[in-house]
Image (cartoon, helix red, strand yellow):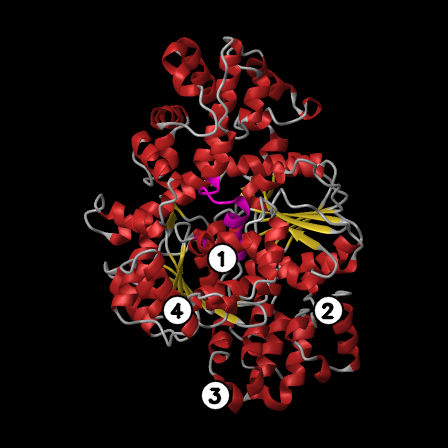
């Protein structure tokens, strides 16, 4: 008779011993069955089955019993249908989604969500990282007759990953659009960030709205501006979408108003397809040595999580100096050579790639970061050092996660964020058991998970007025109407001007307008420029942006003053190559190529591609309003803001960065692919480009061929 009182810890230890399993497969399987029958905790029972499946071959002739246990917990993706009984085969086939070309079967919890969506229900799914939430999107699209699907993702990195996946599956049925200016087709899947979704001039009638990482609706995150924009996008599109599916990691719940305003089925799932094992590391006051020692003993794909880009860079340097890494593929070797040429040979990413170590954070050029994720998932990079930019949403396949820090942005990691990070260890279909190595104690399991507030529906006193003014009057609470009345009645600029500056602090706008009214004579000549500013006019614009829109906070150290911002913008307008900018910057960084590269790339990411164009257009609208009231001819900054945003390249060329073509390569092939702003025409040119006709670096060939394969 099986031991129904078998201790969980003893059973776990027995299931780690591959030789011991083979020596007594029947007896151990009896213990597993006894534990499953006796325990009241389904998660604990399922964990033991997953641990047994890790060593399935060792159970020999008793594998059929193990298959029965997997069937009991609905773990159908781990079963071989050719080895199942008729009864189990029927159950297996009922969990297969219809019309997906690939041989895919859902686990039980996945199938429940899929069936709910197929019935036309709105679903908000909160589930672990390894659940397979994104695959449900594809299955629903495959089995339906949608004309327009809108997938809102939080970051551009997720645009690339999602676009590649959906293009591969649906390129013959749908056009996948990632830029607001692209022309839709008869059937279109839009994959957009919240910012781009709001830029759609003629929003389509959406059959299915998908919101990935829905927890970012809550303002308890670092980036308040993007939270506001996501709230606005969800508000706008849930009004008209026929159906929606929101997905994200495990949370405690939602604000009541969310459920009152929208009708949906909330599904909170703890169902796991992998087991996480936690191992405490004592750094003994010397984390670099402990990290090197730990990683030196790991043989499976490993992600090292760090609190910041600076810490990630330090971790990479220590791993490189210790000689860790692995056999390097020709592609990674070519990538290292190319990075040395196009950025700087002393940048630590160069030496990291030469040893098989990848790096992923917000300061890494997007195409290079995407390349390293693909190489890591393909087994070509044994280590990938990252920050939260990788953890939040990008799919990876790692056996091990090393959590080097317990803070992000100076704040201690809570249980929600910890689960999101540690959940990256293991991957359904690849690793039954993921190993998590902790340099700090883990959060208390009794700590509350994140509670998602959706301010566009809650509308409490903490909801920013910049969001309230974007809500239709009929949907505002009485308290919200009172709060924005003062904005509506403001006399220094029109309400429509304030409203058009989406996400820009209202009081900052009003203060800026008051300054222009008071001292118009001082500012007039500096404001009345069109197309291209001279040095004084550009300096005036950067001064106003820096002083009134909190430039120091937004810069995060990438720019130190309004004057430096002016200099860098002017350098970019001269189309100075990035390598030259880095060499110039070294003189201001005590000779450090690493620091100079970081500062230049930070400027590109934070200012040239985001803050400066957005805030220059806010200034443009305000000065037009103020100067118009004084009977003066206003300036017009739109053309210049667009050029800065596109790094003074054609917009369709800059957009290729999202397709895996680094901007330094894009600069070289402008004449081959430029199409007067027509992204679709540029993609056609790229698709038909014969890379063998050109004298390109091997890594450039690899980038172009990879991009061609995914369009």
Image: magenta residue range: 645-663
In primary-sequence order, the first of circles 3 and 4 is 3
Q: Nearer the viewer, residue 567 or 504?
A: 567
The vertical placement of 370 against 233, above or below, is: below
Residue that label 3 marks: 19
Residue that label 1 marks: 661
Identified at 51% across, 45% down, the residue is 650
The Cα–Cα distance between marks 3 and 4, rounded to whole angstroms, is: 42 Å
Q: Which mark is residue 101?
A: 2
The vertical placement of 323 against 488, above or below, is: below
What percent of the width, then of the height, locates residue 475? 69, 26
The Cα–Cα distance between marks 4 and 2, rounded to whole angstroms, is: 35 Å
In primary-sequence order, the first of circles 4 and 2 is 2
Asked whether the viewer can see residue 321, the reply is: yes
Secondary element at tag 1: loop
Pick the quarter of the image with the C terminus: bottom right
In primary-sequence order, the first of circles 3 and 2 is 3
Q: Which of 632 and 299 is in front in this view?
A: 632
């Amino acid at each position: 008779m099986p031991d129904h009182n078998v201790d969980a810890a003893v059973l776990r230890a027995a299931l780690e011993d591959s030789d011991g399993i083979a020596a007594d497969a029947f007896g151990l399987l009896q213990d597993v069955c006894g534990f499953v029958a006796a325990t009241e905790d389904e998660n604990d029972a399922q964990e033991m089955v997953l641990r047994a499946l890790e060593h399935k071959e060792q159970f020999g002739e008793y594998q059929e019993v193990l298959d029965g246990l997997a069937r009991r917990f609905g773990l159908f993706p781990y079963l071989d249908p050719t080895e199942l009984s008729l009864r189990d085969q029927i159950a297996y086939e009922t969990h297969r989604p219809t019309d997906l070309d690939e041989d895919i079967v859902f686990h039980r919890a996945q199938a429940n969500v899929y069936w709910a969506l197929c019935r036309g229900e709105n679903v908000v799914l909160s589930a672990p990282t390894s659940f397979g939430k994104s695959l449900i999107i594809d299955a629903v699209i495959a089995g339906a007759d949608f004309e327009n699907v809108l997938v809102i993702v939080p970051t551009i990195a997720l645009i690339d990953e999602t676009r590649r996946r959906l293009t591969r599956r649906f390129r013959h049925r749908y056009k996948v659009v990632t830029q607001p200016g692209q022309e839709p087709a008869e059937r279109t899947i839009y994959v957009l960030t919240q910012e781009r979704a709001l830029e759609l001039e003629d929003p389509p009638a959406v059959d299915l709205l998908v919101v990935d990482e829905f927890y970012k609706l809550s303002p308890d995150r670092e980036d308040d501006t993007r939270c506001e924009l996501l709230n606005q996008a969800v508000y706008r599109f849930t009004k008209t979408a026929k159906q929606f599916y929101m997905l994200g990691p495990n949370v405690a719940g939602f604000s009541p108003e969310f459920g009152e305003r929208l009708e949906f089925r909330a599904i909170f799932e703890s169902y796991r397809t992998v087991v996480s094992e936690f191992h405490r590391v004592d750094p003994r006051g010397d984390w670099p040595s402990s990290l090197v020692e730990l990683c030196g003993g790991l043989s499976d794909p490993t992600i090292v999580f760090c609190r910041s880009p600076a810490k990630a860079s330090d971790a990479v340097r220590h791993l490189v100096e210790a000689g860790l890494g692995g056999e390097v593929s020709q592609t990674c070797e070519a990538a290292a050579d190319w990075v040395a040429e196009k950025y700087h040979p002393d940048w630590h990413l160069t030496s990291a790639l030469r040893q098989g170590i990848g790096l992923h954070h917000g300061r890494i050029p997007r195409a290079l970061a995407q390349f390293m994720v693909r190489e890591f998932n393909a087994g070509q990079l044994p280590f990938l050092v990252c920050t939260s930019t990788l953890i939040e949403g990008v799919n990876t396949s790692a056996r091990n996660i090393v959590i080097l820090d317990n803070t992000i942005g100076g704040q201690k990691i809570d249980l929600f964020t910890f689960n999101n990070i540690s959940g990256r260890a293991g991957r359904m279909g690849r690793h039954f058991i993921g190993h998590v190595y902790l340099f700090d104690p883990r959060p208390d399991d009794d700590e509350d998970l994140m509670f998602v507030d959706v301010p566009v529906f809650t509308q409490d006193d903490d909801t920013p007025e910049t969001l309230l003014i974007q809500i239709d009057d009929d949907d505002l609470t009485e308290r919200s109407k009172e709060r924005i009345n003062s904005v509506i009645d403001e006399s220094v600029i029109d309400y429509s001007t304030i409203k058009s500056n989406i996400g820009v602090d209202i009081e900052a706008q009003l203060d800026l307008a008051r300054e222009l009214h008071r001292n118009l004579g001082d500012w007039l000549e500096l404001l009345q420029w069109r197309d291209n500013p001279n040095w004084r006019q550009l300096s005036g614009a950067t001064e106003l942006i820096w002083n009134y829109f909190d430039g120091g906070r937004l810069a995060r150290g990438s720019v130190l003053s309004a004057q430096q911002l002016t200099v860098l913008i002017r350098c970019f307008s001269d189309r100075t190559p990035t390598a030259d900018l880095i060499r110039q910057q070294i003189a201001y960084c005590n000779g450090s190529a690493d620091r100079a590269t970081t500062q230049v790339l930070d400027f590109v990411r934070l200012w040239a591609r985001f803050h400066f164009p957005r805030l220059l257009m806010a200034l443009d609208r305000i000065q037009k309003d103020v100067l118009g009231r004084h009977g003066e001819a206003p300036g017009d900054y739109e053309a210049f803001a667009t050029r800065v945003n596109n790094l003074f390249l054609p917009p369709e060329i800059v957009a290729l960065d999202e397709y895996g073509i680094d901007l330094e390569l894009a600069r070289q092939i402008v004449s081959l692919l430029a199409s007067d702003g027509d992204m679709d025409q540029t993609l056609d040119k790229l698709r038909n480009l014969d890379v063998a006709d050109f004298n390109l670096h091997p890594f450039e060939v690899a980038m172009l061929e990879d991009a061609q394969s995914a369009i």
